[in-house]
């Protein structure tokens, strides 16, 4: 039996966060043995907000370096840059023509982002999910490992695939979201009621993967908790503490009960330091490898060129089939 196919990606905008790592990359690592995996850097999606061109180029390489440093083996996974496989943009356009304005206007990410960037609510931001659907459907992906915030985009991808299959016959595999419970939604350290985000204005809210150990420790020490001084998992009433527990659980694989027991009778001070140290220890080897890779641009170039070539083989087959079915010569 052939292996199941995985596809996922991260936008090339901004610096990667602990949310990106735990919600996405860390889960991808466990999949590389069992599945056929495609991981891309979504640099076309990045154009939906304004970027400095040099920064965008650098970020694209930084994300590739992070993938490899985190442990994605480029021999076992296809690592590529979205823009280098032109089929993405082509299928994206075709799918635009099968996506309804109504369904796009219901996307929470569109609503959030258009509020944040009210001076630049562009058409790309609106049709973003159709391009994301193209990313996934081109590879006939079975599973898409993402954080909770991308679930709605997976739903629309499934709807589009089903719609297309219904009109033209079996064309696309209907993909499923794979969302790991512990790390589905890592929240901000200062505002634990909203997700940890690259674009946070308060830098203490976010752990960036590039943060130095002292900075990580400082940010965790400042993390918002509550006045009960009891480590207990209760996201509704204790969002700050529960978020720290979730981070700790995702890193150590401990259960919430084990964590509650571990810190029974201890204050938040000890708890925060332990969580911080677990993050520091997890990130340290990744940070070291990352720096080494960034100093070796030639190697990175080799990987992404090979990745694009491999990705194109699959993507072009799907696109040809789609074009044949809809009458595009
Ligand atoms: P992006 O770049 O916003 O985020 C990349 C991945 O990180 C996850 N994530 C989080 N998970 C848990 N807690 C958080 N605080 C957190 N913040 C981010 C996201 O859920 C995501 O899995 N549209 C996508 C990129 C994309 C894509 C694709 C993903 C483009 N094409 C095809 C999968 C398949 C995005 O903007 O993710």
Image (spheres, rainbow, N blue to C red):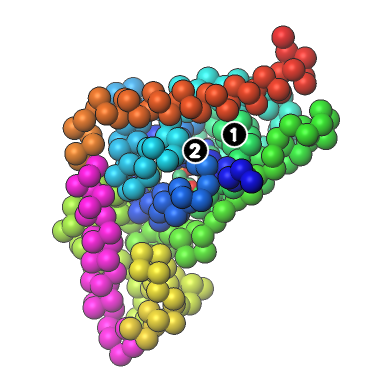
Which label number is shown at residue 139? 1
Say few, some or many: other residues with alpha carbon within 10 Å of mark 2 (under 14 / 14 to 19 / 20 or more): many
In which image quadrant can residue 204 be found?
bottom left
- Taking the image as shown, residue 206 lies to the left or right of residue 82, namely left
Quarter of the image where the C terminus is located = top right
Q: Dots 1 and 2: beta carbons under 8 Å?
A: yes
> Residue 128 appears at what percent x and percent y?
57, 33
Give the residue at mark 2: 38
Span of residues in magenta: 263-290
Q: CA distance from mark 1 to mark 2?
A: 8 Å
> Residue 173 appears at what percent x and percent y?
69, 39
Q: In what element is the residue under mark 1? A: loop
Could you tell me if residue 60 is visible in this image?
Answer: yes
Q: Residue sitting at 35 percent across and 54 percent down?
A: 18
- Taking the image as shown, residue 108 lies to the left or right of residue 228, namely right
Decide: is 61 above or below 93: below
As for residue 265 lying within the magenta part, the answer is: yes
- Taking the image as shown, residue 18 lies to the left or right of residue 115, namely left
> Residue 286 appears at what percent x and percent y?
26, 49
């Amino acid at each position: 039996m052939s292996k199941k196919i995985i596809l996922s990606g991260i936008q090339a905008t901004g610096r990667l966060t602990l949310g990106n790592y735990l919600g996405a990359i860390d889960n991808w690592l466990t999949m590389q043995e069992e599945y056929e995996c495609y991981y891309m850097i979504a640099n076309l999606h990045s154009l939906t907000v304004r970027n400095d061109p040099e920064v965008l180029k650098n970020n694209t390489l930084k994300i590739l370096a992070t993938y490899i440093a985190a442990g994605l083996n480029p021999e076992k996974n296809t690592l590529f840059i979205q823009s280098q496989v032109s089929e993405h943009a082509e299928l994206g356009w075709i799918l635009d023509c099968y996506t309804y304005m109504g369904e796009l206007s219901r996307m929470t990410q569109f609503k959030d982002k258009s509020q944040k960037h009210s001076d630049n609510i562009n058409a790309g931001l609106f049709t973003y999910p159709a391009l994301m659907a193209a990313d996934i459907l081109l590879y006939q992906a079975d599973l898409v490992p993402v954080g909770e915030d991308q679930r709605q985009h997976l739903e629309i991808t499934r709807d589009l695939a089903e719609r297309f299959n219904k009109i033209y016959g079996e064309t696309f595999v209907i993909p499923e979201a794979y969302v790991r419970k512990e790390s589905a939604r890592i929240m901000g350290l200062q505002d634990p009621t909203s997700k940890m985000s690259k674009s946070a204005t308060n830098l203490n809210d976010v752990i960036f993967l590039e943060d130095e150990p002292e900075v990580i420790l400082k940010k965790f020490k400042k993390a918002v908790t509550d006045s009960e001084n009891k480590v207990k998992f209760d996201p509704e009433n204790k969002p700050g503490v529960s978020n720290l527990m979730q981070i700790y659980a995702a890193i150590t694989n401990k259960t919430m009960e084990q964590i509650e027991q571990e810190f029974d009778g201890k204050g938040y001070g000890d708890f925060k330091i332990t969580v911080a140290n677990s993050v520091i220890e997890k990130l340290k080897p990744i940070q070291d490898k990352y720096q080494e890779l960034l100093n070796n641009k030639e190697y990175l170039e080799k990987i992404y060129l090979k990745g694009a070539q491999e990705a194109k083989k699959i993507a072009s087959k799907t696109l040809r089939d789609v074009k044949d079915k809809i009458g595009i010569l």
